[in-house]
C-alpha cells in the first residue's frame, strides 16, 4: 500500500512542500508495503496541508457551521465534523446545517469532493444520545435482557434504529458502541449505563450485533474505548484527569480486549483508542499515544485494518503533553489515523492540522505511513452514502 501510495502522490505532496524524503524513508515504505495489501486505488492530488486536514475531525459551537469551517472544507482541509447537543435544536435545523457542510464539501476547490464528509456523533443509547430518538435503551438495559438471544436481538434493533435515526439527518458515523467490560456497579461506565455487561462474552455478542446492524444501515460504527475502560472507577474520567488502569496484561487481553475480536470479525469500521495509561502495555504514555498499544495490540495482535480515531484531543488526561499541535503529532506517531477535535472551536482543529503538517514536513512522521492513514480514511468515506 505505502509504495503504491507514494507512486500515486509522486510529484504531489512532496513537491508542494519542497521537503526532501527523510533518510531511510524508502526502506520504511518498502517494509510497510510488504505488510499491507497491494490493491490501493489512486488518491486525489493533495497539498501537504490538505493531507494533514484529511486526518482531522472538527467541531463548532452553536447551531450554524461557521464560515471558517465551511472555508476549510471547501479547501480540502477537513475530514469531517462531530456534533454535540449544543449543535442540535431540532431535526430540521441539524439537517440544514449538515446540508451546508455537504455543499461546502462538493466545492470544485476540494480535491476530496468525491468523498462524503465524516459526520458523526455519540448516539450510544439511553443517557448518551446527542440526537433525540433511537436507540432509547442504554447498553446496560440491553445487556440485562434475558435470555442472551433476546438481548442480541435488542442490540441488533438498537444498531438498526440508530443508523436510521442518524442517516435521516445526514450523519454517517456513530461513535458507538462502547465495548468496555465494567467491573463494579456505579463505576465509570456503569454510572451512565454505558456498558453491556461485566461478562466479556456478553459484551462481545451484543457489541458485534449492534455493529453489524448499524453498518448494514449504512452508518459506520466505532468500537470504543480500546483496550478498555471497564476497570476505571467512577472518578477515573479521561475527559477530566489523567487515568492509569493498573490491570495485568493477561486480564486486559482476556477480558478487556476480548469484545474487539468479535467487533473486528463484524468488520467494524473505526476503533476509538483510550486516553488512559495501561502500564501492562506502556508505562509512560496513554494508549492512543502508544505504539505498543496502537500498532502492537490493535493492529498486529488483533489485526484491525480499519480507521483508528482518538478520543477528544483536548481531554484532561493529556495535560502533560503540551500543545494541541504536539498532542496530535504524538497521536499520529503512535499510529492514530484520525484526530478528534471536540473542543467546539475551529482553532483547536487547525492546531491539530498544524501539528500533523509539521511532522509530515520535517520527517517526524513517516510519509508512507501518513499516506496510508489518509488512504484508510478516504476508503472509509468512500464506503458511506453520498
Image (cartoon, rainbow, N blue to C red):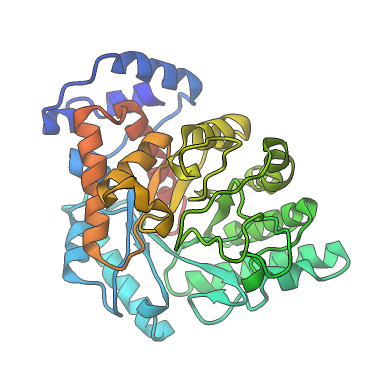
How far across and down, in percent of the image, does residue 232 sit? 62, 57
Q: Quadrant of residue 154?
A: bottom right
In the rendered structure, the answer to whether residue 266 lies left or right of residue 329 reads: right
Residue for point 44% across, 67% down: 171
How far across and down, in percent of the image, does residue 123 sit? 54, 69
- Taking 386 as reference, is 286 above or below it? above
How far across and down, in percent of the image, does residue 60 sit? 29, 69
- Comparing 358 with 263, the one in front is 358
- Residue 119 makes an appearance in the image: yes
Q: Residue furthest right?
A: 147
- Comparing 243 with 57, the one in front is 243
Q: Quadrant of residue 93?
A: bottom left
How far across and down, in percent of the image, does residue 385 sit? 45, 59
- Taking 236 as reference, is 226 above or below it? above
Label tally: 0
- Comparing 321 with 107, the one in front is 321
Quarter containing the C terminus? bottom left
Q: Quadrant of residue 359?
A: top left
- Taking 120 as reference, is 252 above or below it? above
Residue for point 22% across, 25% down: 10
In the rendered structure, the answer to whether residue 1 lies left or right of residue 176 reads: left
Quarter containing the N terminus? top left
- Comparing 237 with 261, the one in front is 237
- Taking 23 as reference, is 261 above or below it? below
- Residue 107 makes an appearance in the image: no
In the rendered structure, the answer to whether residue 203 lies left or right of residue 110 reads: right
In the rendered structure, the answer to whether residue 240 lies left or right of residue 141 reads: left
Amino acid at each position: 500500500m505505502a509504495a503504491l501510495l507514494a507512486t500515486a502522490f509522486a510529484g504531489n505532496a512532496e513537491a508542494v512542500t519542497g521537503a526532501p524524503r527523510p533518510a531511510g524513508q524508502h526502506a520504511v515504505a518498502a517494509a510497510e508495503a510488504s505488510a499491507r495489501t497491494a490493491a490501493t486505488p489512486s488518491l486525489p492530488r493533495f497539498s501537504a496541508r490538505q493531507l494533514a486536514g484529511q486526518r482531522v475531525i472538527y467541531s463548532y459551537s452553536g447551531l450554524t457551521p461557521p464560515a471558517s469551517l465551511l472555508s476549510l472544507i471547501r479547501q480540502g482541509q477537513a475530514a469531517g465534523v462531530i456534533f454535540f447537543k449544543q449543535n442540535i435544536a431540532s431535526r430540521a435545523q441539524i439537517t440544514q446545517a449538515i446540508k451546508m457542510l455537504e455543499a461546502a464539501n462538493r466545492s470544485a476547490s476540494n480535491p476530496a469532493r468525491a468523498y462524503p464528509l465524516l459526520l458523526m456523533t455519540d448516539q450510544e443509547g439511553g443517557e448518551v444520545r446527542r440526537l433525540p430518538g433511537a436507540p432509547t435503551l442504554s447498553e446496560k438495559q440491553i445487556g440485562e435482557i434475558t435470555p442472551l438471544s433476546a438481548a442480541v436481538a435488542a442490540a441488533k434493533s438498537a444498531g438498526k434504529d440508530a443508523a436510521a435515526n442518524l442517516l435521516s439527518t445526514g450523519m454517517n458515523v456513530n461513535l458507538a458502541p462502547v465495548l468496555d467490560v465494567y467491573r463494579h456497579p456505579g463505576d465509570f461506565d456503569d454510572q451512565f449505563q454505558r456498558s453491556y455487561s461485566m461478562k466479556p462474552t456478553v459484551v462481545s455478542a451484543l457489541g458485534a450485533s449492534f455493529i453489524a446492524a448499524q453498518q448494514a444501515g449504512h452508518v459506520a460504527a466505532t468500537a470504543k474505548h480500546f483496550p478498555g475502560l471497564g476497570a476505571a472507577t467512577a472518578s477515573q474520567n479521561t475527559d477530566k484527569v489523567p487515568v492509569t488502569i493498573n490491570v495485568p496484561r493477561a486480564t486486559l487481553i482476556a477480558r478487556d480486549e476480548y469484545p474487539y475480536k468479535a467487533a473486528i470479525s463484524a468488520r467494524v469500521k473505526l476503533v476509538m483508542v483510550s486516553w488512559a495509561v495501561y502500564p501492562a502495555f506502556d508505562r509512560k504514555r496513554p494508549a492512543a499515544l502508544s505504539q505498543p498499544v496502537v500498532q502492537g495490540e490493535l493492529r498486529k495482535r488483533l489485526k484491525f485494518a480499519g480507521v483508528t480515531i482518538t478520543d477528544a484531543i483536548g481531554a484532561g488526561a493529556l495535560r502533560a503533553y503540551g500543545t494541541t499541535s504536539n498532542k496530535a503529532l504524538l497521536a499520529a506517531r503512535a499510529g492514530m489515523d484520525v484526530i478528534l477535535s471536540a473542543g467546539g472551536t475551529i482553532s483547536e482543529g487547525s492546531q491539530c492540522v498544524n501539528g500533523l503538517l509539521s511532522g509530515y514536513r520535517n520527517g517526524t512522521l513517516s510519509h508512507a505511513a501518513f499516506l496510508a492513514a489518509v488512504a484508510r480514511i478516504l476508503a472509509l468515506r468512500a464506503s458511506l452514502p453520498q
